[in-house]
Amino acid sequence: MTTGMDIPAPRRTRIQQEKRELILEAALEVFSTNGFRGSTIDQIAEAAGMSKPNLLYYFRRKEDIHETLMQRLLDTWLAPLRELDDIGDPLTELRSYIRRKLEMARDFPRESRLFANEILQGAPRIMPMLEGELKTLVDEKAAVIKGWMRAGKIARTDPWHLIFSIWATTQHYADFDVQVRAVLGPDRGGAGRFEDAARFLEQLFIDGLKPKSQS
Amino acid sequence: MTTGMDIPAPRRTRIQQEKRELILEAALEVFSTNGFRGSTIDQIAEAAGMSKPNLLYYFRRKEDIHETLMQRLLDTWLAPLRELDDIGDPLTELRSYIRRKLEMARDFPRESRLFANEILQGAPRIMPMLEGELKTLVDEKAAVIKGWMRAGKIARTDPWHLIFSIWATTQHYADFDVQVRAVLGPDRGGAGRFEDAARFLEQLFIDGLKPKSQS
DNA sequence: CAAATTTTTGACCGATCGGACAAACGTTAG
DNA sequence: CTAACGTTTGTCCGATCGGTCAAAAATTTG
């Protein structure tokens, strides 16, 4: 596999920027609902309102679109975890991290599903990033959380699995959205379901993490 | 879309039973890692060790295989939730439900990913089941949980989102397995990761659900 | 044994896949 | 104007897709 970029480093005209953005937007829609193998260039081209050869003028190969989409995604996707730092109250830090992750599931469900699709299929295209950048970041934050536990600020538990559980519960509302809405029904599954989820998750995590001496 | 079954009701020979089972086993492997659209009949046939026309002799269409797989899955998949009943201690009931779901994620990860793939792609083939059978079951169990809350046996919270969070956290270890193992690394990500997860989830949920008077 | 039936396969079909290519089109600079 | 350059598209390619079909092979039945 080559690096496979197209119109080199300096994106020439403003038209190219706009068209590339248009394609990436369309590709996000298609890839996130069909996966990489299940998506076709024709689908993306049609969603972007252009012919297939025209699309291939901006992105030489199908993989290049997916790769560009992934690189952008990962930066913004891990931003909330990066913001988790040692200053401030631990419980407040965790609570706002959960809230930010849930807001991302609400506001960027397609990005969440794109990521979920990639992981589900064995992460063939981002495995090095998982073992490298992601693991490093999580280990670093796990150490921070462990410090909070040693200081008695939060209950002692496994920091890695704590992070997993936050990811799982929040992303669930993006990845399994159709199931959530189907089960909640038209009334409870409306726009307010994210507020309900936020309230529930706060109670679940905070009460579970609060040191026993404080409760 | 027709009902599209093949060799009618009475499965004749034992060979047919065996071959159908062989195909379903192979299809589970392929569908769960590539999704429906991303999987091909050739892939399934090769995984089952037979030619494509031979496979199509037992299942007329690609969709028939997927449909059969789904019907089987859903029965066993919801079994743990069905077992959640009003007899016994509420906290113990919930704890064993979480444990059973986590065991299913450990022992049947392909089934979990098959289901996740279907939901991720908008559940086009099982939407009626979600709005019907699944919603009915969840509403029923939510009522049971609500009863426990009224009786002061567990903390008051949203029963539907509680069920969602159990699904999300347990299935995460099947659906996002490659990410979990990549982040935990070769040491912590070994065979013991499910025991670690079980310990963590028990602490998270039980301590969070325990009535404050008891803690 | 032979006849009937079930199982398996090679060859093939039209549709669609990712992608290539040259020609046409639009725009801008001189 | 014309030449140069960036953009768009119709057409085509080999590979693969889901699925068909007739015939061969294996098995069961009498």
Image (cartoon, coloured by chain):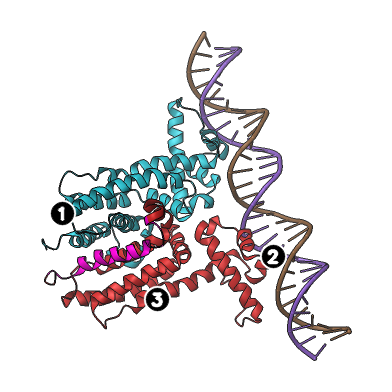
Chain colours: A cyan, B red, C brown, D purple
SS under mark 1: loop
Image coords of residue B66 (percent x, y)? 54, 66
Q: Which residue sits at x=20%, y=68%? A: B209
- Distance from the alpha carbon under mark 1 to that under mark 2: 64 Å
Image coords of residue B4 (percent x, y)? 59, 71
SS under mark 3: helix
Residue B200: say if magenta: yes
Q: Give the numbered dot on residue B79.
A: 3
Q: Is residue A86 visible?
A: yes
Q: Nearer the viewer, residue D5 or B145?
A: B145
What residue does disc 2 label?
Answer: B53
Image coords of residue B64 (percent x, y)? 57, 68
Quarter of the image with the C terminus of chain A in it:
bottom left
Tags 3 and 2 on a common chain? yes
Q: Amino acid at mark 3?
A: Ala
Image coords of residue A11 (percent x, y)? 45, 27
Quarter of the image with the N terminus of chain A in it:
top right
Q: Which residue sits at x=29%, y=60%? A: A190
Q: What's the magenta region?
A: B188-212
Q: Amino acid at mark 1?
A: Lys
Q: What subunit carries mark 2?
A: B
Compared to residue A196, the image places residue D10 above or below, namely above
Q: What subunit carries mark 1?
A: A
Q: Nearer the viewer, residue A80 or B95?
A: B95
What residue does disc 1 label?
Answer: A153
Q: Is residue B98 left or right of residue A53?
A: left
Q: Which residue sits at x=55%, y=45%? A: A42
Q: Give the numbered dot on residue B59.
A: none
